[in-house]
Every structure is written in C-alpha cells, then in structure tokens.
C-alpha cells in the first residue's frame, strides 16, 4: 500500500512538472514569435495540453484521497479541449478579416490576404512606418 | 516530492502568466491581445487547480469552471464583434 502511494506521488509530480513546462513553452511562443499567425500556434495547442496535464494530476491526487474521484476536473478538461479549437478558429478568422501584417516566412498565402493591392509583409510595414515623419 | 513539484509548477505557471501579460501590454494588434487574454484565462485555471491541490480540498474548482466558461464566451463575443461589427445580429 505504501508502495502504491509512492508510485502515485511520482506520477502526480511528473504530470505537474510536464504540464507546467508545456504551458511555459506555449506562453514563450506567444511572447517570442514574429507575427500573429505564428503566435496562434503556441497557446491554442501547447497551453491546452499543459493545463490538461495539470487537471489529470489533480484527478489522480483527489482520487487518492478519501473523498474519491470527482466529476468537476473532468468537466473542466472536456470543456477546455472542446472550446480551445473554436476560439483559435475565430481568432484566425478575425485576424484574416483585419488583414494583419505577416512575416515573409509564414507559409500558406491565404487568398484573404492576397486579393487586395496593399498587401504587406512585416518588413514592408516596418519600412513604411519608418518613412513616416 | 509532491510538495516540491507543486512549488516548481506554480513558479513556472507564474512565469507563463507574466509572459502573457507582456503580450497583452505590447501586442501590436487587437487579435494579439485577445489571444493573450485567452491564454491568461487558461493559465489561471491551472493556477486555481494547483491551489486546490495545495489546500487539499475542492472548493475552488467551481471558480475554475466559471473562469473557463466566461473566458470562452468573452473570446467568442469579442471575435464576433471584430468580424461582424455586432455580437448578436
């Protein structure tokens, strides 16, 4: 029984550390990437995975206690995993609607960014703003 | 071991929230700020869950559920406003 508790403690500690490292990498991508279309990748995928790991650790911890496993953590996990792609899709649609500037290495060339005359990359935008008085 | 892992995990999540706050303050466009706020909601849910593990009871998990729902609804509402100029048409 003691061995089971030690094993479960190791599993919970592993999930906690792994989840927080995932969330930190996602937020680092949000802070460091160059344009919006790159920045969307980190939070929408990696941060959700990190929080999922932490909620899994919470489920394991509270199922070890006397009160038994509960439904609330599972509800939060399912809700987060359903809503993260929807909000990422809406954010990318609004970014395409606003025709945000993009880096020249961003691939895909969506037609929403191509059909007008004043399409611009980040370099041209920064040059244009530097020419302004 | 669990105590130590919990402390490290809270510290890493705090750094992540500070990075999100940097993007909210600096972010050049409006979708950047919305994305950073959405990420901050998700990270704060994780912080509340960690606080619940620290205390050893489940009182605060309903607050985490509320933050998850309100964060999703507010992100969708602001995105719809940016897309259509109106939230409910």
Image (cartoon, rainbow, N blue to C red):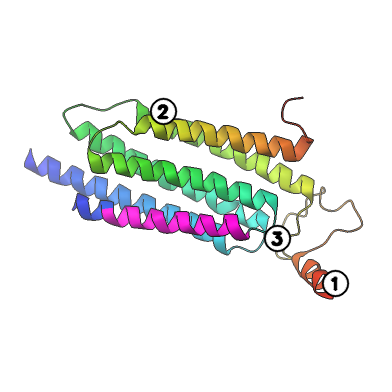
User: Can residue A55 be spotted in the picture?
Assistant: yes
- The answer to the question of whether label 2 and label 3 lie on touching residues, with beta carbons closer than 8 A, is no
Q: Residues within 10 Å of mark 1 (few under 14, many from 20)?
A: few
Local SS, label 1: loop
**Residue with the mark numbered 3:** A106
On the image, the x and y values in percent for residue B69 come to 51, 31
- The answer to the question of whether label 2 and label 1 lie on touching residues, with beta carbons closer than 8 A, is no
**Residue with the mark numbered 1:** A132
Of A78 and B64, nearer the camera is: B64
On the image, the x and y values in percent for residue B21 come to 52, 56
Of A51 and B18, nearer the camera is: B18
What whole-number distance in Å separates the C-alpha atoms at marks 3 and 1? 26 Å
Q: Residues within 10 Å of mark 3 (few under 14, many from 20)?
A: few
**Residue with the mark numbered 2:** A75
Of A121 and B57, nearer the camera is: B57
* Chain letter of the residue beneath label 1 in the structure image: A
What whole-number distance in Å separates the C-alpha atoms at marks 2 and 1? 52 Å
Local SS, label 2: helix
- The residues colored magenta run B7-26
User: Mark 3 or mark 1: which is in front?
Assistant: 1
User: Can residue A86 be spotted in the picture?
Assistant: no
User: Mark 2 or mark 3: which is in front?
Assistant: 2
Residue A103, compared with residue B60, is above or below; it is below
On the image, the x and y values in percent for residue B10 come to 33, 53
Instruction: Check if residue A26 falls in the magenta segment.
Output: no
- The answer to the question of whether label 3 and label 1 lie on touching residues, with beta carbons closer than 8 A, is no
Residue A43, compared with residue B81, is above or below; it is below
User: Image point 82% across, 49% down: which residue?
Assistant: A111
């Amino acid at each position: 029984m003691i061995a089971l508790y030690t094993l479960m403690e190791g599993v919970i500690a592993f999930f906690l550390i792994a989840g927080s490292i995932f969330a930190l990498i996602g937020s680092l991508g949000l802070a460091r990437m160059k344009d919006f279309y790159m920045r969307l990748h980190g939070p929408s995928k990696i941060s959700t995975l990190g929080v999922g790991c932490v909620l899994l650790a919470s489920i394991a911890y509270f199922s070890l206690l006397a009160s038994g496993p509960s439904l609330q953590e599972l509800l939060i996990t399912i809700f987060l995993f359903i809503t993260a792609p929807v909000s990422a899709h809406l954010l990318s649609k609004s970014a395409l609607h606003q025709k945000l500037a993009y880096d020249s290495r961003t691939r895909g060339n969506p037609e929403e960014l191509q059909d007008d005359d004043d399409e611009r990359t980040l370099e041209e935008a920064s040059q244009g703003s530097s020419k302004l008085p | 071991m669990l105590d130590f892992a919990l402390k490290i995990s809270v510290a890493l999540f705090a750094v992540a929230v500070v990075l999100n706050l940097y993007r909210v303050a600096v972010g050049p466009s409006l979708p950047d700020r919305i994305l950073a706020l959405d990420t901050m909601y998700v990270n704060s849910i994780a912080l509340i869950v960690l606080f619940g593990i620290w205390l050893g009871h489940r009182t605060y998990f309903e607050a985490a559920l509320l933050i998850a729902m309100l964060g999703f609804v507010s992100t969708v509402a602001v995105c719809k406003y940016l897309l259509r100029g109106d939230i409910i048409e």
